[in-house]
Image: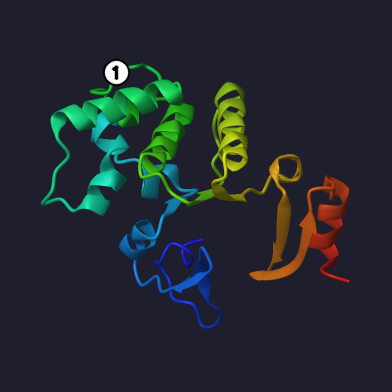
Amino acid sequence: PILLFGADRASSGRITMNGKAVTLRSPRAAIANGIAFSSEDRKGEGIIGELSVRDNLVLALQARRGFARPLSSRATEDLVDRYMEALDIRPRNPGALVKNLSGGNQQKVLLARWLITEPQLFILDEPTRGIDVGAKAQIQKLVADLAVDGMGVVFISAELDEVARMSDRIAVLRDGHCIAVVGKECGVRELTALIAGGAQ
């Protein structure tokens, strides 16, 4: 996923967006091309714990605009209010330090941060890992709704039942290589067999 987000270089192949080849030499270039990435390392690479929910929410949009062009207070509050409500981020206190939120609400803050940029492609790496059942269900529904609404979503998960239930197409990786691409009809048993035995 970090290669698709411009944080690593490919040794071969190409990336196309809307039928046009794009060169992604940095995460900023990826963001400019409508790509968002939420890391599996929520605390190490995602939230900035010492900042408020508000500051975390607008961080990606502000980075895309450039920090020399700060968002107005009015625009910031409108965005924060809208996305805190849309993702049911609790407590509904934008001034709270994000490190004091539950894991599920921290994850919602990260998702909202990227949704504010209105991406065309959203790469989600283990977005439901380590969160409570209620938040997990909310995030799964959000991801499904985004896909239905036309957003491209790359959903990365080690939970095979989650992958089988939520995906239209599934790329099975083993030892860093894609060994199969299957449709949504593929169940957990078949996925397990592919992972264990490789492509036939």
At label 1, which amino acid type do we have? Asn
Expressed as whole percent of the image width and height from the top left, the position of residue 107 reads 45, 35
Instruction: Please rate how many residues cluster around mark 1, counting C-alpha atoms within 10 Å: few if below 14, some from 14 to 19, many from 20.
Output: some
Q: Residue at x 13, y 48 (%)?
A: 69
Q: Is residue 143 left or right of residue 60?
A: right
Q: Is residue 147 left or right of residue 22?
A: right
Expressed as whole percent of the image width and height from the top left, the position of residue 86 reads 44, 24
Q: Relative to residue 95, is residue 1 depicted above or below? A: below
Q: Quadrant of the C terminus?
A: bottom right
Q: Secondary structure at mark 1?
A: loop
* Of residues 13 and 55, the one drawn nearer to the viewer in this rendering: 13
Expressed as whole percent of the image width and height from the top left, the position of residue 180 reads 77, 66
Q: Residue at x 87, y 49 (%)?
A: 189
Quarter of the image for residue 166 reads top right
Residue identifier under label 1: 93
Q: Does the rendering let one see residue 89?
A: no
Q: Does the rendering let one see residue 20?
A: yes
Quarter of the image for residue 148 reads top right
* Of residues 147 and 164, the one drawn nearer to the viewer in this rendering: 147
Quarter of the image for residue 32 reads bottom left
Expressed as whole percent of the image width and height from the top left, the position of residue 103 reads 46, 30
